[in-house]
């Protein structure tokens, strides 16, 4: 009877310890924060902002990223899960959770997180690539190749180790690049062969000629020129508002006037890269002949101009 009571008591203690373990391990990173480290100062700043706005999904996502850098995987996964719950339209927290699982070698959980990320955001090409890598580590070759091919629709640099360190461990790089070669060549050929009415439309956006503000009449980004009032666009059901789109013809700079060519005595054009001065330096000063008395050098004689002829037919 006494033995049974002791066994029940020991079992109850073990159950309490198992239940209290995760609770005690929550937010362990807080005790290791050092305000003298910039990354930890950023973490403390996020914690202060979360006190005012506890339901901000982006703050929880960024906090999870900073925590994961220090290796606090469980706390980071909690923040990512909370961020994904607060904002069901973004796949960023799920992608970051997949990275944490990949760091721990949990490829099944990583593939699940990446799959959820691309379900929310199909344009997250990095998530497609990581989904392929997680499936490759699980020896699911067909699923891995399919995800890899999707990631290469826009961004082929994901197989570059300088950008993506995981690319060094992929064994399917050559096969994926070879099978997608024809499609990638066709997409690359479109900008050179298509006929657009505004050929420099993309270039105008790349050079920041379009000022975008979240609210009509809001601040214009630095470097952008505010448009007149009659050119401001009306907001359409929320979102960004395009406030300035200058004409394409006016966006092209005026070509600089060409310099007049210079010619040599032989009537040959001087090359534009011809040096003004010889590499050996300036020529030494020319010495004139001594005077008739045999003294010092006399100055060079000034030539006497010839008289202009006059008469019929001259002038």
Image (spheres, helix red, strand yellow):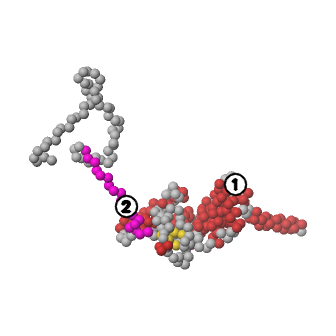
Q: In the image, is 68 to the left or to the right of 149?
A: right
Image position, residue 189 (x, y; %): 38, 66
Residue 254, labelled with which disc?
Answer: 2
Residue located farthest toward the bottom when viewing the structure as drawn: 237
Q: Is residue 113 above or below residue 299?
A: below
Image position, residue 42 (x, y; %): 65, 58
Q: Is residue 162 magenta?
A: no
Q: Residue at x 53, y 58 (%)?
A: 164
Q: Secondary structure at mark 1?
A: loop
User: Magenta residues: mostly which secondary structure?
Assistant: loop
Q: Earlier in the sequence, mark 1 or mark 2?
A: 1
Q: Residue at x 41, y 65 (%)?
A: 251
Q: In the image, is 259 to the left or to the right of 4?
A: left
Image position, residue 53 (x, y; %): 68, 69
Residue 257, labelled with which disc?
Answer: none
Q: Which residue is mark 1?
A: 35
Q: Is residue 247 magenta?
A: yes
Q: Secondary structure at mark 2?
A: loop
Q: Residue at x 60, y 68 (%)?
A: 94
In the rendered structure, which segment of residues is drawn in magenta? 246-264
User: Mark 1 or mark 2, which is nearer to you?
Assistant: 2
């Amino acid at each position: 009877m006494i033995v049974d009571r002791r066994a029940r008591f020991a079992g109850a203690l073990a159950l309490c310890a198992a239940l209290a373990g995760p609770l005690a391990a929550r937010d362990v990173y807080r005790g290791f924060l050092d305000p003298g480290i910039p990354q930890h100062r950023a973490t403390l700043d996020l914690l202060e902002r979360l006190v005012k706005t506890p339901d901000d999904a982006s703050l929880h996502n960024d906090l999870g990223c900073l925590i994961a850098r220090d290796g606090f995987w469980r706390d980071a996964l909690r923040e990512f899960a909370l961020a994904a719950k607060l904002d069901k339209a973004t796949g960023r927290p799920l992608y970051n959770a997949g990275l944490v699982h990949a760091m721990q070698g949990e490829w099944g959980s990583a593939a699940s997180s990446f799959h959820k990320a691309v379900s929310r955001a199909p344009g997250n090409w990095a998530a497609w690539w990581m989904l392929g890598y997680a499936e490759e580590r699980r020896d699911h070759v067909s699923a891995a190749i399919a995800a890899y091919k999707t990631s290469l629709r826009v961004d082929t640099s994901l197989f570059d180790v300088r950008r993506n360190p995981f690319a060094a461990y992929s064994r399917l790089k050559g096969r994926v690049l070879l099978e997608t070669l024809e499609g990638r060549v066709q997409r690359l050929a479109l900008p050179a062969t298509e006929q657009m009415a505004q050929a420099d439309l993309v270039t105008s956006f790349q050079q920041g000629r379009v000022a975008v503000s979240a609210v009509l009449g809001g601040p214009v980004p630095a470097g952008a020129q505010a448009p007149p009032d009659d050119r401001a666009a009306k907001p359409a059901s929320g979102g960004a508002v395009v406030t300035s789109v200058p004409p394409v013809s006016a966006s092209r700079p005026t070509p600089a006037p060409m310099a007049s060519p210079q010619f040599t005595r032989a009537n040959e054009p001087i090359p534009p890269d011809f040096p003004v001065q010889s590499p050996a330096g300036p020529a030494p000063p020319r010495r004139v002949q001594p005077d008739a008395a045999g003294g010092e050098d006399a100055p060079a004689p000034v030539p006497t101009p010839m008289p202009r002829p006059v008469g019929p037919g001259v002038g």
